[in-house]
């Protein structure tokens, strides 16, 4: 498996599908929107983009399986694509110009390629196993900020799972008082990509799915950053929560996060 070649093919695929999404953003109507669940929206654009991605990814690795937001799971023994055709659907529907395509490839359960394409800025972030992380062909790294007070943090607000809202708000308050600020963009994949290129020092969120984080978390790590679950574990793709940071502020943020969320973590076990 030549990861470099496959990664570039995925980048090119994202550029093509991204053009379709961008073109449709000016045409979609409220009548095209469906609700999959509480505050969980989908449109024909998500479904069409996902089909376009799957059709081409099958050609790259014919025997690969899929975990896809709209199509569900097709298992495979060795290779598996994890894809979100439109991360930031609510932004897209409300014509807020920040949404992305997220694609990761796993080999034997380990991520080996990650691509996040932010459609509106035409910014493609990508990385592959044993390689560096890149943005539109230029190598990127996480920030060198070593102080929490100088850090800009990103998060995602809970929108369907409010069981951990109290510690979430406590942690939010702590960061408001001890950082440079907090941003909520509406696309976890983009938040992670922005950590990877040093725009944010950290991103945290719970209630996530594999397609939200698989590609972005891998890119963060290849850019020199660290990712962990709210309990401090290394499992982030299937762990449903994530803290992604540069290496210099990771422990400080992680220790406070564990302190605040620990009762909830224990209660869930």
Image (spheres, rainbow, N blue to C red):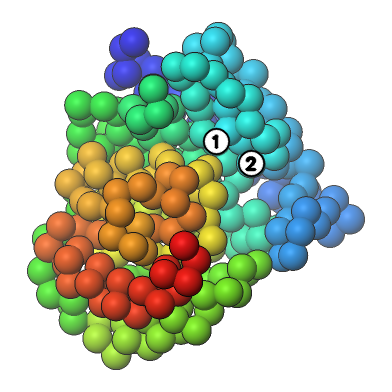
* Residue occupied by mark 1: 83
Q: Residues within 10 Å of mark 1 (few under 14, many from 20)?
A: many
Q: Residues within 10 Å of mark 2 (few under 14, many from 20)?
A: many
Say above or below: 48 vs 268: above
Residues marked 1 and 2 touching at CB (< 8 Å): yes
In terms of sequence position, does the residue under pointer 1 or pointer 2 come before the other?
2
Say above or below: 63 vs 34: above
Residue drawn at the location 46% of the way across and 46% of the way down: 238
Residue 45: tell me if it is visible: yes
Q: For this view, does 248 lie left or right of residue 168?
A: left
| Real-space Cα separation, disc 1 to disc 2, in angstroms | 7 Å
Residue drawn at the location 40% of the way across and 29% of the way down: 109
Furthest-right residue in view?
31
Q: Where is residue 22 drawn, in percent x and y?
A: 62, 44
| Picture disc at residue 94 | none
Residue 57: tell me if it is visible: no
Q: Where is residue 204 drawn, in percent x and y?
A: 38, 65
């Amino acid at each position: 498996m030549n990861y470099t070649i496959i990664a570039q093919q995925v980048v090119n695929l994202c550029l093509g599908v991204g053009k379709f999404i961008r073109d449709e953003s000016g045409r979609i109507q409220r009548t095209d929107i469906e609700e999959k669940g509480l505050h969980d929206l989908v449109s024909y654009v998500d479904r069409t983009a996902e089909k376009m991605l799957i059709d081409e990814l099958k050609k790259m690795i014919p025997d690969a399986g899929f975990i896809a937001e709209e199509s569900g799971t097709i298992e495979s023994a060795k290779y598996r694509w994890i894809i979100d055709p439109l991360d930031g659907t609510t932004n897209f529907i409300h014509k807020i110009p920040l949404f992305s395509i997220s694609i990761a490839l796993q080999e034997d359960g380990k991520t080996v390629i990650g691509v996040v394409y932010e459609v509106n800025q035409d910014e493609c972030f990508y990385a592959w196993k044993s390689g560096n992380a890149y943005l539109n062909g230029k190598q990127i790294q996480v920030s060198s900020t070593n102080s929490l007070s100088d850090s800009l943090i990103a998060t995602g607000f809970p929108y369907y799972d409010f069981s951990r809202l109290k510690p979430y708000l406590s942690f939010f308050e702590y960061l408001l008082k001890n950082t440079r600020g907090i941003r909520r963009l509406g696309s976890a994949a983009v938040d992670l990509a922005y950590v990877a290129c040093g725009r944010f020092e950290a991103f945290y969120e719970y209630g996530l799915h594999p397609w939200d984080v698989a590609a972005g978390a891998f890119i963060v790590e290849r850019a020199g950053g660290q990712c962990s679950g709210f309990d401090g574990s290394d499992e982030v793709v299937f762990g449903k929560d994530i803290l992604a940071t540069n290496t210099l502020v990771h422990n400080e943020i992680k220790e406070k996060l564990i302190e605040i969320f620990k009762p909830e973590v224990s209660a869930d076990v």
